[in-house]
Amino acid sequence: MTNWAQWHNPSGLADLLVGLAWLYLVLAGPLRPRLAPGQPWPRAEAIRFFSGLFLVYLAVGSPLSRIGTDYLFFVHILLQLVIVFPAASLVLRGVPAWMIDALLRRPGGRPVWSRLFRPLTAGSVFVLVVSGWYVPRIFGWALAHPAGPAVEGLLFFGASLLFWWPLLSPSLVFPPLPYGGRILYLFAIEVALTGIFTYLLMGEHPLYPAYVLAPRLIPGLSAENDQVLGAVLLSGVSSLVLVGFLLRNFLRWSRADAGPAVRRPPFRPRSAR
C-alpha cells in the first residue's frame, strides 16, 4: 500500500543539500569575521538560500516526487521546473559576494571557473542536460533505477545553477553579463530548447512505457494526454521565464542607456518674468 504522506531522502542528493547548508552556516557564522570583517549576518540572503534548498528537497524527497516518478509525467515535469527556476535562482541569489568570492579567488581555481562560467559553457551544459534527459532510454533508466531521482536532482540542480550564473551571479570576480549579453544569452537558450519542446509535443505515441503501465490517478487522463500536458508545462513555463527575463533585461538596459532625466525649469509666461 502506498503511503502518500511519506517523505524520503534520495541517497547522495540529501547529503549534498545538508553539506551545502552546513557550509553556508560556517562561512556566514564563525568564518565571517575573517572573510568579510564588519559584514553583518546575511539575513535576507540566508532566507533565499535555505528556501532554495528546501524547494530542491521538496522536488526530490516529498510525496509529490513519488507521484511524478511512478504515476504522472506532468507532475514529474512540474517538479523539475521547481528545481530549474525558483530553487536554483534562490540559492544563487542567497550567496553573498564575499562568500562566493572567497572560493573563486583561491589559487589555481580561476582558470577552471572562468571556463565553466562562460555563457557558452553554462548555456550548453544546461541545454544538454534538459534535452538529453528526455531521451526515452535515459528517462526510463531514471524511473526504474533506485539512484535515478538523486542523479536527476543533482544534474538538474547543477545545470540550473550554471544557467542562472550569467544572469544572477553574485560574484565580483565573475559578475553577470551586461544587459546586451543577457538578452542574447536568453534568446539563444530559448531557441536551443525548441527541439525538446517540439519532440515532446509532437510525439504521436507515449514515449515512456512506465507511465503507460502506471495506474491512472486522474480518471480520463491517458498516458498520451499526460505526456502532452507535461510538454505544455515544460515549454510554456520555460518560455514564460526566459522571455520574461529577456524583456525585463531589455527594459533595464533601455533605462540605463537613457540616463537620468534632465529636469527643465517650469515654463513661465513672458509677462510673469
Image (cartoon, rainbow, N blue to C red):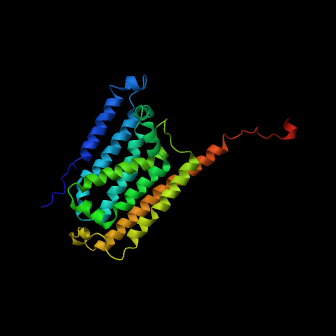
**Quadrant in the rendering for residue 77:** bottom left
Q: Nearer the viewer, residue 117 or 180?
A: 117
Rendering coords of residue 55 (x, y %): 32, 48
Instruction: Determine whether 271 is above or below 209 in the image.
Output: above
Rendering coords of residue 259 (x, y %): 66, 41
Q: Quadrant of the C terminus?
A: top right
Residue at the image point whose x is 34% and y is 63% from the top:
134
Q: Quadrant of the N terminus?
A: bottom left
Q: Nearer the viewer, residue 207 or 59?
A: 207
Instruction: Determine whether 60 is above or below 232 in the image.
Output: above
Instruction: Determine whether 5 is above or below 223 in the image.
Output: above
Residue at the image point whose x is 44% and y is 66% from the top:
195
Rendering coords of residue 216 (x, y %): 23, 70
Q: Nearer the viewer, residue 150 or 217?
A: 150
Rendering coords of residue 268 (x, y %): 81, 39
Instruction: Please indicate whether residue 31 sits to the left or right of residue 198 in the image.
Output: left
Can see residue 150? yes
